[in-house]
Amino acid sequence: MIPETHQAALDELLRSAGLPAAAGNTVDLLAESTNTVYVVQTGETDFILRVYGDSGWPEIYDRARLAKVIHLHEVLAAKGVSVPRILGHVDHPDLQAVLMEHLPGQPLAEALDQVPLPERDDLWRAVGTSLQSVHEISLADIAGEIRGDQVVPFGDGEGPARGWGTFATGDFLDDTDRLSRHLPSLKVDGDWLAEVMSRAREHLDESPVRLLHNDPTVDNIFVERSEDGWRCSGWIDWEFARHGDPAWDCARLELFREHHVPAPSAAFWKAYDGPNQLNLVANQLLVGLFCAGIQFENANAEPGRHAHAIDWLSHFQQHVQRLERLLDAKTSAVIPSTVQGPDSNPGVLGRLRVALRLLMGLRAHDLRAARSYTQLMWSEHSILRRLLLLAGWSLRQMFDVIPRGLMSVSFADQVKSTPIWLDEQNPHADVPWRDGGKLPERVDTLVIGAGFTGASCAYHWSKLSKVDSLAVLDMGDPATGASGRNEGVVVMGRYAAMVRDTVRPYLDSVRKDLSADDRSQLATQFATVYARAAYRNADLVEATVKKEAFDCDYARNGWIQAREAEDQEALAASVEFGQRVGAADWTALPPDQVLKLGGMSVDDPAGFSQASATFHPARWVWCQLQQALRCEQVGLYTRTKVTRVESDDEGYLVITDRGDIRCGNLINATESYTAALYPHYRDLIHPVQTQAAFGEGGPADMPAEIALSGKRSFFGRHPFDNRAQGLLVGSDATRVANHHAGRNAPSRFITCFSLAEVWRYYDSAPVTLTHEWSGTPGFTTDEYPVVGRLDGRNMWIIGGMCGSGTAVSFNGARHVVTRVLGMDDDCDDYPEAYFAPTRLLDPENHPWPELEMV
Ligand SMILES: Cc1cc2nc3c(=O)[nH]c(=O)nc-3n(C[C@H](O)[C@H](O)[C@H](O)COP(=O)(O)OP(=O)(O)OC[C@H]3O[C@@H](n4cnc5c(N)ncnc54)[C@H](O)[C@@H]3O)c2cc1C
């Protein structure tokens, strides 16, 4: 029942708005917190009645709330931000109320629940654009509360006006201290914390201030589907609005949310175009503490409401360290010599200093890498000439290219060797031991390895097996092999002409019985079959991400690969070949399109794999496992190393450092580690070291969620902590010893080289390098994968994916799982003639494919 006073206010408002009297109307209570909200249904149209009551706010603000809301709605509407139209208000001494339009659309919270995953990006994009418009509104030069149509400096006129930093960090240290009883991670060196926060306060005090919504929860944002996709149909609840640092709203939107509500995706951060990392991290700390305060000190706190903020605070020290680094970078950024373009001159001393450091940092791996590089770049020359070319190239790199390239780069005090993807908590860490689990004595099928391949086996098994059991073992936690250390590009596989050209030399050596033309034809068939399987793989990955609503930042925007003038003929020929064999995703992109799509400046057309995508590779593994583990036939056993495998009539005895397991079928998803486990297969797959590095900052023109590479390195702007702010770079493809599979030993020279390569295509921009790591994809001799039976019995393998694991693992796992389960498969994407390991282990007896008539 609506109280009489509220009904009277409603009648008065309807009358003054010229609307039919309330008789016969339905009035539903929508919410009651600091005000009471009703939905008024008058037949055709719904309205919102908001009644302001006693909120417990200081009276000075409470009485001004109505005027504040009316004023802000006017300002916002004038700036093109959608807010509900106010149809009338009453302002009596004991009651204030407004009658407002009911916004079209639905709350963001509801839409996020309903739309399929890729559409969520559309929603977030709309919200990002709209919040950006809010944050363009400046009501005054000062930070403060909004009272009526005035901005009143924080501090209520007592003492000097307080800037956003002084206001927001006022109780930071006391709050941290008090809350550390509940969250031990908050305990850090107090002096250091005080020092960092005092610098942050100064910075925030100087930052521009804007209109803040201050309560941007997913219930206060309305969205509506339009012909061009989703749009933000409006923002409600402006009574908490303040004037301050806009990054506060972003931090609130990100951290102060229900458990089931996803964080703003990279599309939001892209559309919002900011905020500055320093302000964001500082405000995240403040929001985190604010939420922790509510959670632990408020008897009415809703459980789960602040879980994200508390999770975030569990790495408190790291966030403070990050804030400190960003503050340092800000200080150094004003020293002109640290941020200069690639054409600026580091000076003789600067060059010598860099060259000396590079020389001192050289390791045996750099020499091996130099050999592979020489092979790749100058294979057609004599050894002597290659050495001379390498010497000239190295000197140029060390004394010129890299010193110039590093002028805008700084290195964090402690560069972590953890891949960025594994910086977040691994949901499957230590499973099942953390819950007191036991190793089974027997399973029907055992998978060794929980990377892309092993997780995909588990996923398909969970969908296809009715009764048979499967266990996945890994010596580490899931995705800690190459799958959690890569660049995060979902590739369409190597382009067809490349497959043809890498398979061909192997065919020349093992199929001497064929004429050169026939070997060319066979290589073409290999490329065609490979592309068909890889293309289906890519579509299956996308369909699965959508169907299962996997939260792994999947976006399909292609992969641009720069090519130089001398490569143009080969590029055109590869595109033509791709078209011919049905691999039409591979095209050439003219320089203006390269600039438009990738922000890269190039002089010549680039190769473009249109259907490639990007994602968070570790989350792809974790999501698949999460889904698979819902099926009771599937089990996961981490931190369990297989030391030997024996076979007998009953199947396989798998000996691990936690005990033995028997199984009828065994699937090896061990990729580059295969030879270390099975010495007799040492020539099947060998580890090749590749490395990557990540830094905060990077070129502003480099868009996120598109794969990019130059001729000698890859790079991209990747969401980090869900924000599109970081630069990921990498390079190298050097074979290492089998027992070095999985080694994490990146070369600093290669990191510097990869960073310098970025400035060939982009204007240089500040980067603070924070992570650097390496991993080992697995390569076969002919650089063509193996998918099939390994021992002629029930031991299988999916591997040798040659740095394109995302192109083979999912479909390869589907193929093997259907075979193991003895099920019919509607397509044979991995015919034995092409993919069986005998191609490499026993080429003489391998059942090679028939030559097709051309
Ligand atoms: C820097 C870098 C960038 C890359 N970029 C891309 C890219 O953008 N796109 C792409 O498609 N590919 C990329 N790759 C390659 C890609 O990461 C691999 O192809 C892919 O991860 C292979 O997946 P997997 O599951 O087969 O192997 P892994 O992820 O290596 O998994 C093998 C697992 O087996 C476990 N294991 C091995 N031996 C044992 C044992 N004895 N007992 C128990 N467990 C064992 C390991 O612990 C490991 O977790 C990149 C690789 C690197 C290093």
Image: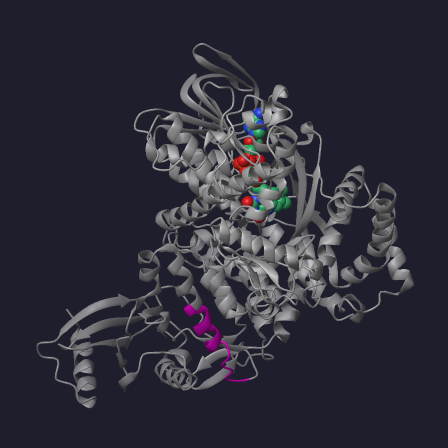
Q: Residue at x 60, y 38 (%)?
A: 503
Q: Is residue 129 left or right of residue 486?
A: left
Which image quadrant is residue 717 in? bottom right
- Looking at the image, which residue sits at the far top? 649
Q: Is residue 582 left or right of residue 51?
A: right
Q: Is residue 774 left or right of residue 62?
A: right
Badge count: 0
Camera-nearest residue between 212 and 152 = 212
Q: Residue at x 68, y 55 (%)?
A: 711
Residue 336 image point, x, y percent: 79, 71
Q: Quadrant of the N terminus?
A: bottom left
Residue 378 appears anywhere in the view: yes
Residue 132 included in the magenta stretch of the image? yes
Residue 426 appears anywhere in the view: no
Camera-nearest residue between 852 and 6 = 852
> Ligand 1, what quadrant?
top right
Residue 72 image point, x, y percent: 40, 82
Q: Is residue 220 left or right of residue 807?
A: left
Residue 729 image point, x, y percent: 66, 53
Residue 113 image point, x, y percent: 33, 56
Residue 817 included in the magenta stretch of the image? no
Reply above or below: 622 against 41.
above
**Where does the magenta region start and end?**
126-140
